[in-house]
Image (cartoon, grey):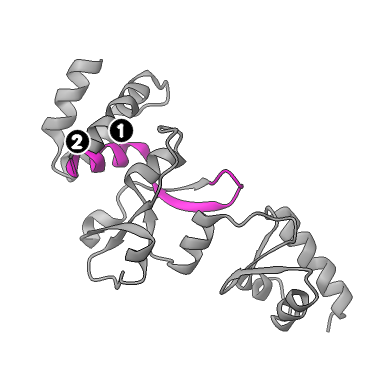
Amino acid sequence: MMKTEQQKEKLLRFADKNGGVITTKIVTKIGISRSLLSLMVRKKELIKVERGIYILPNGVDDELFSLQNRFTRIIFSHETALYLSGYSDQTPLKYTVTVPKGYNSQNLLEICNVIQVSEEFYNVGVETVKTIYGQKVKTYNVERTLCDMLRNGNDRNVQIILPALKKYVDDPKRDLLKLFKYARILHVESKIQQYMEILI
């Protein structure tokens, strides 16, 4: 059995590599006793952010990472996805997430805008990106997000989506085939077509 000090050093190394964050999931995976986490919290060597997530005393609480760690089925979408993919510089006042229909989102509603979709749409266009603090989270890619924004069209969406569409059109990495594929799946093909005809 690894001695406590050796376990502690190993845990701190992993936390350091992981942007100052350690989770009970990682601790279990690397063969360290979970009781060490409680001991280190008592000694103020770690700070418990919430259940299952700990940060180093000089670490930063990454809200997006913590949220997805707590609610594992959420996928960041709409304005939040645009922000994560660099297509909007507006930090969302309230995160928008998508969950499958039937998911119990009562606790989520207090802290997020929650969109429910059927299972057939839920996994379309999911990708993993890094937050500004270097933690990996699941979000929808830009093509899926643009379609979602047009699908849930309102005045606020138009103010956000127009600059995002212009940026997308100018992006050498744009994938118009993928965009139109998602537009067909999500039933916004005519809207995407209209915008593309104006912008391209």
The reply, left or right, for residue 21 in relation to residue 145 is: right
Q: Earlier in the sequence, mark 2 or mark 1?
A: 2
- Crowdedness of circle 2 by 10 Å Cα count: few (<14), some, many (20+)? few
Residue sitting at x 72%, y 60%: 15
* Rendered location of residue 165, percent (x, y): 30, 26
| Quadrant of the frame with the N terminus | bottom right
SS of the residue under disc 1: helix
The residue stretch that appears in magenta: 131-153
- Crowdedness of circle 1 by 10 Å Cα count: few (<14), some, many (20+)? some
Residue 57: say if magenta. no
Count the labels in the image.
2
The residue at which mark 1 appears reads as 160
Tell me: residue 34, above or below residue 56: below
Report the amino acid beneath label 2: Asp
The residue at which mark 2 appears reads as 155
* Rendered location of residue 112, percent (x, y): 36, 58
Tell me: residue 114, above or below residue 170: below
Residue 136: say if magenta. yes
Residue 181 seen in the figure: no
Question: In the image, which disc is placed on residue 87?
Answer: none
SS of the residue under disc 2: helix
- In the image, 56 versus 135, the foreground residue is 56
Residue sitting at x 41%, y 32%: 87
| Quadrant of the frame with the C terminus | top left
Callout 2 touching callout 1 (CB < 8 Å)? no
* Rendered location of residue 175, percent (x, y): 34, 29
Question: Picture quarter containing residue 48?
Answer: bottom right
* Rendered location of residue 125, percent (x, y): 33, 46
- Of all residues, the one furthest to the left in this rendering is 190
Residue sitting at x 79%, y 69%: 45
- In the image, 49 versus 35, the foreground residue is 49
Question: Picture quarter containing residue 36?
Answer: bottom right
